[in-house]
Image (cartoon, grey):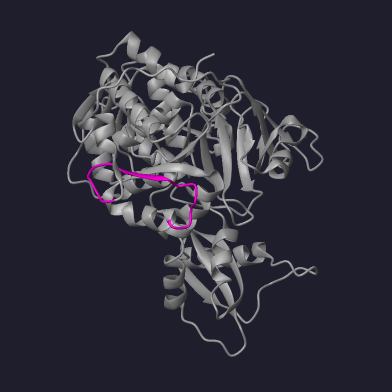
Amino acid sequence: MMDLFQMLLQTTQRNPDQTALIFRDNPISYGQLLSAVSGVAKGLRELGVEKGDRVGIFLPNLPQFVMAYYGCQALGAIAVPANPLLKPDELRYIYNDAGAKAAVTIPPLADVLRAVQEQTPSLKHLLIAGGEMPGFVPFDALWQQPAPVPTPPEMNPREHPAVFLYTSGTTGFPKGCMLSHRNLIANCESCTPVLDMSPSDNFVTVLPLFHAFAATVCMHLSIHVGCASTLLERFTPDGVLEAIEKHRCTIFPAVPTMYAAILHFPLPREYDLSSLRICVSGGAPMPVAVMEAFEKRFNVVILEGDGPTECSPVTAVNPLKGVRKPGSIGLPIPGVEMKIFDDNDNEVPVGELGEIVVRGENVMLGYYNLPEATAEAMRSGWYHTGDIGKMDEDGYFYIVDRKKDMIIVGGLNVYPREVEEVLHTHPAIAEAAVIGEYDELRGESPVAYVVLKPGAQATEREIIRYCRQRLANFKVPRRVEFRESLPKSGTGKILKRLLRKEVEQEQGAGAG
């Protein structure tokens, strides 16, 4: 059974001259990528990185992200990617929890890593890509050095983690989701026929690679198939369309807010998108109106799918050659079982609401160092997604609501508890509740409802600034509402559904 490094090796042996990555108009072949990965592996080994060690990847969408990730796999080390928007406190928690031994970043983010290292005893080595800085090992010197193709250590691809992906937890602290080599390759094997993949395909990779969606669908899947991936460092509507036109991209995976942004953006000119075979949407519910308008304007099919990080992540997608049902997440992909359970883990009849559960080779090993959370998520042998949904008579799945209070901002998960924890540290705040509010551009935005301590004073601007210093910008409340009290149940639990209802009524009145 293959591991990820062997997957790269096999693809390269089939066609070393095939383009693997395109970055800023420069193509990188599979042969060049394997050579770079071998250099990274050699350099990391010389720093003392061994099988099972954790390596932080704190990078935007650069070729060095792929090199670092696969350099880890060549050693049997575990990649720990993180959102480059995170602030030191957020990243410090992840690296301390994972026990990261080394981490790689770019010069603009170097200060964040320096601040993290000061209180992270395990973090021995900092590496810098795209420049040189005092105290950092030059990463580019590693991948540019000649090195023999490494032989990965003995390991069981079913049991050995390839990556820890940290998902914000309802406890307020992120959980390290452990995905094995087999989890990820199984997901690639399932996605290949669903998307009718071939080596002539070329992904537009503008989704961030630290995120499970892009990591699997854009990075691992392209290497599995032996096709190209065009890396874009940031999303702009015209930048994406220009890349599709220039590099004849065939597949565009994105979150719904990206499709909406392209649709509403005043494009400077018409673009030739004739190479585009399919678009894939995930990460958040796709508004049917946006899907229909986008398809009509750009003459391309959008396949809506879904899947949580814990499932590597793809679980379901609308079929390319079968019936597409707008508003549904489609059918389970090959090798993945999905059902709807009630609160007692019994299957419910077709059409009835319950929790979506998943079983298959794509389902995670568990949460790192959290056996109880793992057991809870995996009870009855099924991964419990926390999504409330239903299945229709044709086997298509629909997500109706989220059991967890998660807010999805531009495809990125924000757990209210994490924001509330920060708000509760503000000296003037007695109580806080955070919910999501509809946002035309980002899908949702966090909104904070706060009750001040008796005699205390604070302004909305001050509280937002306080949050901005401690949270990534996408987690910061867009607005703050001050209340005398918050609605509560008889047991004293804050009733967020009543706050949501108020917001919906206000937005409904505003729309009218």
Q: Is residue 287 magenta?
A: no
- In magenta, the rendered stretch is 118-134
Q: Is residue 129 magenta?
A: yes
Quarter where residue 66 is shown: top left
- Relative to 15, say whether 261 is above or below: below
At horizontal 72% and vertical 70% (from top left) the residue drawn is 488
Residue 123 position in % (x across, y down): 45, 47
Is 180 displayed left or right of 142 in the figure? right
Horizontal and vertical percent position of residue 142:
28, 32
Quadrant for the N terminus in the image: top right
Would residue 171 be found to the left or right of residue 189 on screen? right
Residue farthest bottom in this picture = 455
Q: From where the camera sits, is residue 409 visible?
A: yes
From this view, report whether residue 472 is shown above or below residue 240.
below
Dominant SS in magenta: loop
> Which residue lies at the image location 57% right of the left edge and 30% below the top edge?
315
Q: Position of residue 309 (x, y in %)?
A: 55, 38
Please state if 508 lies on the left or on the right of 390 as rendered: left
> Residue 301: which quarter of the image?
top left
Q: Residue, x 52% and y 25% (percent of image)? A: 181
Front residue of 445 and 223? 223
Residue 233 shows in this picture: no
Furthest residue to the top? 14
Q: In the rendering, at what x and y percent does residue 469 appear? A: 42, 67
